[in-house]
Amino acid sequence: MQFKKKISAFLSAALVITSLSGGIYADETTAGRKIKGDLNRDYTVSAADVVALGHCLLGKAFLEEDDLYYADMNKDNEINIFDDALLRKTVLGERELEYEEEINPTQPPTEQPTEPETTEPPTEPPTEPPTEPETTEPVTTTVTEPQTTVVTTTEIQQIDLSDMPSEYSYALDWVWENRIVRENSTARWNTIFDQIVAGEGTLNYVVRWQSYKTLSLEQRQQFAEMLETSVNNWTDYLVGYDGWKYDHVDVSIVGWAVIDENCILDRQPDEIIYTNLTDYDSQYDTSNGREEIPDKLPNAPDELSRMYHFDNNIGFDYPGGLDKRFDMYMWATQGFPDIGGCGGDWGQRLSDNAYLSMLDGSGIHVFEHELGHGFGITDFYGEEGASDGFPPGGFPEPTIMMAGNSAEITNYDGWQLRYIWSKIKDETDSNGTRRFN
Ligand SMILES: [Zn+2]
C-alpha cells in the first residue's frame, strides 16, 4: 500500500482501539524501545495493533513514513497482508518480539510497570484470557531473579460485542436477523465452533480424495498446513474475545479416504488410509467438461465421524478416544469445475485441481469462504435487502462471504464470526444443557 503523509486518520483509529486491549506483552523490558508491530506506540504488541494495521490495510487509516518500521513486519518495504499475518503471530506469542533501542524515547504510558529491567524479552504466549466477558482481571506474574523477586501486574482485557465498530452494527444485525436466524444456519450444534470446543481446541479432518490423481508426501503435508492456516485465519479473530478459550486451533489430518490406494505416494507408517467405497451418481453434479467425475466415493468409518454421531444423536464416544475422531471432510472431486465449491458443517468440497492449486497459494480464499459456511455464515447471492440477499446499503467493508467481493477474510468478516459466537455461546437446550462447556 502507499504511504501517505497523513497521520490524523491513523491517530483516530489508534484512539478508538486503545480501549480494545491491554498490553498482552506489557513488560518493563520493552519500555523505551521501538518494537516491530507496535503501531500505536504503547510499548506493547497487542490486538490493538492488529486492529490498527487492519484499518490501514483497508484504507480507513493511513500510515506515515515514520510508521514504516513498526508496520513492515517482514521488512520488504511494503505494508500488506503478509505483515498482518506476522503481526498476528507475534500477538499470539508464536514469534519473538523484535525491537531496536529508541534514540529519544518518549515517556512510556503511566500504566506501564517501571520495575527494574530483566534481560530476557518476553517469549511466553499470552496467559489464558479470563472466561467472563467484560472483565479486566489483574494478572500477576512473578519473576524470580537472583536475590530479589519482582512482581509485575499486567492488565489483560477481553473484548466483546460492545467493542464492535459502530459502522458494522447495522449490517451484522441485519445479517443475523434476516439471514442467519431465519435460515437456522447456526441451529445445528455441529458448527465449526461446536467442533472446536468439543475437540478441546482441535479440529480433525479426513481428506476425501475422490480423484485418481496422485498425492506426494510433500503435497499431503502441505494440505495439513493449508488447513491449519485457513482455519486459524478465521479463529484468530476469536482470540481474546468474549470467553473464547483457545489461542490457536490445532488442525490435523487424521486419515485419507481414497478411491485408489496407489494415489498415496511414499505412504508413511503413521498414515491412515481408508479405501471403503460406495457407488456415486454424479448426474446432478456440474462437470468441468474435461474430466469424468468418478462413480465411486471413498468413505471414512462412521464410528469415527463426529457428523455421524451428531446426526444419530448417539453421544460422542469414539473408539480409541477423542483424538481418533474426524470432524469434517476436506473433499476433493475430480472433474468438478475449478472455480467455486460448497461447504457446511460436514466439510468443504472443491475440485481436486482447486485444492492442488492452493498448495501454490492460489484460490485459498475459496476454501476460506467455504469454511465460513461451517461457522454458520450464509451466502449473499440475492439482491440488496432480499431474503437471500445482502444488507440494505451494502456491507461496510468487503467480505469473503460474498462471492467475488474479497480475496481475504476482512476485519468485517472477523466481526461477523465474533458476532455469531457472542450470540450462540450461552445457548442451552430444553433440558438446560449448555451448548458449549
Ligand atoms: Zn458460499
Image: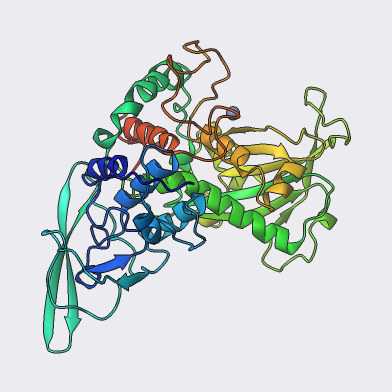
Along the viewing direction, whichever of 229 and 200 lies nearer the viewer: 229
Along the viewing direction, whichever of 124 and 19 lies nearer the viewer: 19
Residue 334, position as x, y percentages in the image: 80, 40
Question: Which residue is at 36% across, 51% downward?
Answer: 64
Q: Give the image's coloring scheme.
A: rainbow
Which residue sits furthest front?
5
Quadrant hosting residue 11:
top left
Which residue sits furthest bottom?
147
Count of labels shown?
0
Along the viewing direction, whichever of 29 and 233 lies nearer the viewer: 29
The answer to whether residue 303 is left or right of residue 109 is right
Placement of 241 over or under 119, stated as above or below: above
Residue 311, position as x, y percentages in the image: 55, 32
The answer to whether residue 34 is left or right of residue 354 is left
Question: Which residue is at 55% across, 44% downward?
Answer: 327
Quadrant hosting residue 156:
bottom left
On-image quarter of the C terminus:
top left
Question: Which residue is at 34% across, 70% downward?
Answer: 99
Residue 24, position as x, y percentages in the image: 27, 58
Q: Report if residue 427 is visible in the image.
A: no
Placement of 123 over or under 341, stated as above or below: below
Placement of 319 over or under 96, stated as above or below: above
Residue 308, position as x, y percentages in the image: 58, 37
Q: Report if residue 295 is visible in the image.
A: yes
Question: Which residue is at 76% across, 65% downward?
Answer: 267
The quarter of the rendering in which ligand 1 is drawn is top right
Along the viewing direction, whichever of 290 and 85 lies nearer the viewer: 85
